[in-house]
Amino acid sequence: MSKKKQKIKALKAEVKRLRRALEAPKGPLVSPLAPAAFPELPIVPGVRFATAAAGVKYAGRTDVMLAELAPGTAVAGVFTRSATRSANVLDCQAKIGSAPDAGAAIIVNSGNSNAFTGAAGDASVAAICDAVAQGLALPVDRVFTASTGVIGQRLPHDRITAKVTELVDALHPDGVAQAAAAIMTTDTFAKGAKATADIAGTPVQVVGIAKGSGMIAPDMATMLVYIFTDAAIAQPTLQAMLARLTDRTFNAITVDSDTSTSDSLMLAATGVAEHAMIDDLTIPEAAAFEAALHTVMHDLALQVVRDGEGATKLVEVQVTGAASEADARKVASAIANSPLVKTAIAGEDPNWGRIVMAVGKSGAVADRDTLTIRFGDIVVAEKGWVSPEYTEEAGAAYMKNDQITVAVDLGVGAARDTMWTCDLTYRYVEINADYRS
Amino acid sequence: MSKKKQKIKALKAEVKRLRRALEAPKGPLVSPLAPAAFPELPIVPGVRFATAAAGVKYAGRTDVMLAELAPGTAVAGVFTRSATRSANVLDCQAKIGSAPDAGAAIIVNSGNSNAFTGAAGDASVAAICDAVAQGLALPVDRVFTASTGVIGQRLPHDRITAKVTELVDALHPDGVAQAAAAIMTTDTFAKGAKATADIAGTPVQVVGIAKGSGMIAPDMATMLVYIFTDAAIAQPTLQAMLARLTDRTFNAITVDSDTSTSDSLMLAATGVAEHAMIDDLTIPEAAAFEAALHTVMHDLALQVVRDGEGATKLVEVQVTGAASEADARKVASAIANSPLVKTAIAGEDPNWGRIVMAVGKSGAVADRDTLTIRFGDIVVAEKGWVSPEYTEEAGAAYMKNDQITVAVDLGVGAARDTMWTCDLTYRYVEINADYRS
């Protein structure tokens, strides 16, 4: 080959490489991992929705949703443990468990998170709660709020309170899809999920919506989730179910996401369905409901990961054979949060050495010689070394999938855990280097 | 102009355009944060160096360094706590504290980390130690090894043992710069530092070299550091000093870096200097030496950050006013490890909300209303809200510096901590998505 031909070949390769590098930053408008469509969601007896365009920050779209809950509705909630959590979160935490007789309301705005806004933030929450309490003739301790969006800017709550009458007049049972759209911020798709449970012969609906800002690591207002059901469940039982399912769903999508300043997950059970009140976690009716609730929470949690900023691959991390459940979670989260693992997956590189690294750094009991690592069904490493059957070709072919399973068996016990994450791409850096500008 | 020449010209223009569009991803050959030059390092009495090109993996460069240490040399070491640490690390840990009468040797190769190589890895360490012990007439328990580079591939140790005679013959006191070059892997510059201490009128040298693979998060063989001095210090005293300074230097550059599989930091004190043996941490001579040692360790630690993959900014995170030292470290590491903080800095975005987020998620005692955040000397947020004097223009101008200080005062106590990190850029993703291909 002539020198010039060689030069042309090298330059062409460089152009190809650079174009590929540039491709991701342009980014799709909707995550490539998004579901094909927003699901058809049934009406949940006892719940009505309304949305409005209050112009908190965004123009030309709805940015407030109101949900009205029938008298007797039990409300459970799980919130961020952040030391700098928002005024809204503190207010909601104080109100969970208040007497349900009068019903309840949830009002959420997008565009401004009302976080780190000092005493003004508290005043905004109070003003919104007062307006909704008056509009729906509710005690103020039955009005729950959330705000999501930019932080450190005073919430122009007058724009929201000015819309309360309009919202109350517009309430109707069929508005959950509109509600899902109104709470979006940097989400590339609206998130909804449903399931049905049979409670001793009575069918009940479980419907949920979520907003995940698309941030892989925690930030303000990473996640808001609202789940509605017409089942009749006592508040303490509802709260217990919600808490234990959260560990396997929303707290399993990234270890850090449980501590952003606005994360809120609320579950409202209106009790309109005509079955005996469930007030014991151990009865079969509780198990039937919990299974449906898990379906909805798992579905929404994975949709949040699928909308991870810049995500091109959904990654399930399965850990088995751990000495304890805490160890299993440590290993899963070390892998799911490792930038080196996540960039390797973005590059479709079956870099199992980085999995070994993550296991090692996790702090869990592990033994090099009992560790097994699989990509999907492919055994990559076992007995302290690369598997004799493993080939880089097989590993590289598997990594081209848009759903990847990384399975680690520690071989030192019987505990297990599963977490979900996504890859770390150029697009993630682009979005987060430019987010506010 | 010929057709081929035109083609080359057009392709060159396209490459230039694409590189400009990507800017960081093409990346400089040497980190923009690198020091202007490798320092002039003095001879350390009692230490001799040699390097060789063994062809472990790289061609056309040296990849093995041997350091010979005079009889009586005390050797201290700090190693990774990873559960999957390499055979070399386990071997070194077993040997630290062995009788110093016969002297000692350190042999390090680049190109292959000998990690996750099963029983073969142990055999490689033994073979190398045997060869060096024979070549230098040392007991085998005074030969320390390290390997750095690709993991999960059998170390071709025959290539190293075949060079031992050549290395022994080439030993000379003036070879520390060559040693620094031989242990580089993905480093973009060789790292060296020096300091002098006055021990009761006797000057002693402290000279160190480091290899940081440039990985921001932990991976195999992230960091190797070797420090040499002619001071006379008892091994237990030397070990205690090294351990406590590590917390303020190499363990402060990222919280996770302390747990990669090959991280090794060794300190050899030959005792050739003619002063009374230092065997007590509380005497003034110990303090004088410790100050010099700290200078060298701090300098090398920052050089490792300056060579962070894709780094364009060096970031110092200062935390004050914490309730405890553990809390101060939690907050500093939450900030220094946050991808959202690091991408914002890459984008020169004074996104102080992400600092609030990191404080909140850290788990440390914090109060929104006593928190103060500064970028350099600029007060950004205080008393639970953005500072009235703060302007985005001032913040944005500050973020254009290539050295950034993020200072957080928690206002709840008197404990403090400082950590160092770098920004997270496209280039980081590119390097780590493509590392092995």
Image (cartoon, coloured by chain):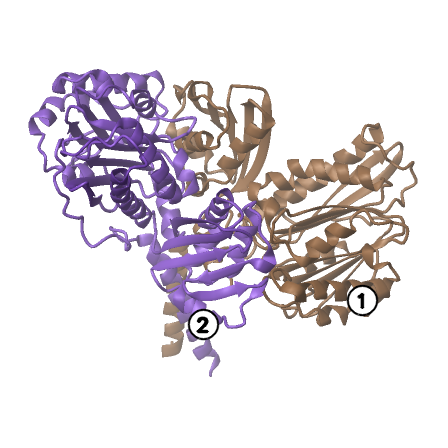
Chain colours: A purple, B brown
The residue under label 2 is A393
Name the side, left or right, on which A282 lies relative to B429: left
Q: Tell whether label 1 touches label 2 (CB within 8 Å).
A: no
Give the structural element (helix, strand or loop) at label 1.
helix
What amino acid is found at the position of numbered circle 1 in the picture? Answer: Ala
- Give how far across and how far down residue B324 sits, in percent: 58, 24
Out of B389 and B243, give the one closest to the viewer: B243
**Displayed quadrant of residue B256:** top right
Number of other residues with Cα within 10 Å of mark 2, as a class: few under 14, some 14 to 19, many 20 or more: few
- Give how far across and how far down residue A352 sits, in percent: 50, 60
Whether A82 is drawn above or below A362: the answer is above
- Give how far across and how far down residue A42 sits, in percent: 13, 42
Chain under callout 2: A
Q: Is residue A89 visible?
A: yes
Out of B12 and B279, give the one closest to the viewer: B279
Chain under callout 1: B
In 3D space, how far apart are the residues under numbered discs 2 and 1 (Cα atoms)?
37 Å
Whether B18 is drawn above or below B408: the answer is below
What amino acid is found at the position of numbered circle 2 in the picture? Answer: Glu
Q: How many marks?
A: 2
Q: Residue at x 90, y 54 (%)?
A: B102
- Identity of the residue furthest to the bottom in this view: A1
Whether B258 is drawn above or below B121: the answer is above
Q: Is residue B12 visible?
A: no
Name the side, left or right, on which A78 lies relative to B340: left
Q: Quadrant of the C terminus of chain A?
A: top left
**Displayed quadrant of residue B135:** bottom right
Out of B300 and B30, give the one closest to the viewer: B300
- Give how far across and how far down residue A39 sits, in percent: 17, 48
Number of other residues with Cα within 10 Å of mark 1, as a class: few under 14, some 14 to 19, many 20 or more: some
Out of A245 and A6, give the one closest to the viewer: A245
The residue under label 1 is B131
